[in-house]
Each structure stands twice: as C-alpha cells, then as structure tokens.
Amino acid sequence: MIRHIEFTNLCNFRDIGGYATQDGRTVRWQRLYRADSLGWLDGDDLTTFRALRVRSVIDLRHAYEVEKAGRVPESEGQHYQNLPIEGRRWQKDLFDEELGVARYLADRYLEISEDGVQNLRIALETIARSDNAPVVIHCAAGKDRTGVLAALVLSLAGVSESDIVADYALTGLATERFVADWTRRHPGAPLWPGFGLAPAEAMRHFLTDLTARHGSIERYVRQELQLSSATIAELRAHLLTDQAKEG
C-alpha cells in the first residue's frame, strides 16, 4: 500500500494505515488520510483525489482560514465539517530558543487539547463511523492540528507511542516544499524559527504531558472529550483489521 500520495499542489497527503497495534491487529489502509489544505485541489489533483473515493472531510482550520484559502471543492460532494480545534492564537514571543522548537510546539498542542474539546469529540465520532469512510482530516500544513487529532486516533486504536511519534515526524519530509510554497504565496512575510518543522520530540513531549495530566490518552478522551465507550469500540472495530487477517 502507498502511504504518501503525490499531488501537484498538496505537500503532505498520506494514509495513516498500516501501523500495528498492541493486540496484534493493524490499522486498515484507505480508511483515514491526513493532509495539508484541500483548498489547493485543482486540475489533475482533483483526478487523484477522486480516485481515493473520499466520503468525508474534517477541516480543522479556523473559519477565517477557510474563507481566505478555500476548502475542498463543494463539487466533490463530500460530507464536509469545519471543526476548528485551536482556541488560543500562537504567541510567537513565547518561543524560547533554549527550550527549543519541540517544547514550544508541544505546549501549543496541549492548548489544543484544552480548547478543542467539543470539536475533537465530534471529529472522533465522525471518524469512528464506518459509513463516513474514507475520511480526510486536514488543517493548513497537515502538521499541528492534524497531528494532534491523528495522534488521538492512533492512540485509541492501540498503536504504540513510537509509531505515533514516527507518523507525526513524517511531515518533516514535506517541510522544505511546504515552506517554499508558503513563501511563494506570501512573499516577504516573516517566518519564525520553527515554521513548518515537525520534530519527533514535539509529539513525544505532547503525549507524555497529556498522559501525565490525565493518566492516559484514553482517559483524556473519555473524561475530557466525553467520548463514549461505544464510540471508542466502534472506532476500533472500523479502523482495525481482524487479528487473523489483513483487509
């Protein structure tokens, strides 16, 4: 199966299937994708996108971002949800070079876990339903907000922390192209030192801190997001293979 799906205008579209779980199952391919902004879909990219037969799109950006940069074309007919999960705007003056980019990013992800409770729950409920699949979750770069939601899904599925961290860090393969595209679209705009970066330690810090606060990722999802046991079971049944076979 193919993890990285090539588009002309998108930098970071990939399948999050294929990861093994602690009980010996595997996350199914072609059920859940993560991406940067689908507002750039056009021309041949639409043909590539249609071949994936996506049914649902979860757009984690703010409404003003959607208005400015566009959304997945309505002509494609997906069930579209705009579910912003970022509350506080990032204060770049809080960045401390001594603490590093990873620590700064992890702190922002923790803010998302606090501020995005309602929409994170709705997103997980959408992903859990098999009749919504395939689903694409995305933000602007497919890194931060998308990374948080993808980490919650994979953790609930039983994927190891090391694989969750590795999946997040794969965004680094798209960083150079993403920064170049963004700079071309925003000539002269300043970039902070961590722009576009996805250091593995950022996700590792986030998972460690979220677990320290709540006891476990699943406990956070159950108690803070109020995701039901039935929905968690549905998510696992839908996204994971049977233990005996792939498919």
Image (cartoon, grey):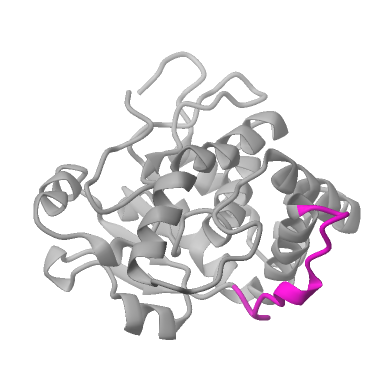
Which quarter of the figure has residue 93? bottom right
Residue under the point 68% across and 39% down: 200
Q: Position of residue 202 (x, y in %)?
A: 72, 48
Residue under the point 61% across and 33% down: 166
Q: Judge by depth and name the residue closer to the eye, 106 or 172.
A: 172
Q: Judge by depth and name the residue closer to the eye, 80 or 4.
A: 4
Classify the position of the C terminus by image quarter.
top left
Residue under the point 21% across and 60% down: 41
Answer whether residue 18 is visible to the viewer in this image: yes
Which quarter of the figure has residue 238? top left
Magenta stretch: give its range.
86-100
Vertical order, 199 against 43 (above or below): above
Let me know if residue 89 is in the magenta part: yes
Q: Where is residue 118 in the image (x, y as percent from the top left)?
A: 60, 75
Q: Judge by depth and name the residue closer to the eye, 191 or 56.
A: 191
- Lateral position of residue 138 relative to residue 217, left or right: left
Q: How many marks?
A: 0
Answer whether residue 158 is visible to the viewer in this image: no
Vertical order, 5 against 225 (above or below): above
Vertical order, 233 against 142 (above or below): above
Which quarter of the figure has residue 165? top right
Vertical order, 196 against 19 (above or below): below
Q: Position of residue 53 (x, y in %)?
A: 19, 47
- Lateral position of residue 153 relative to residue 175, left or right: right
Classify the position of the N terminus by image quarter.
top left
Q: Where is residue 187 in the image (x, y as percent from the top left)?
A: 39, 71
Let me know if residue 71 is in the magenta part: no
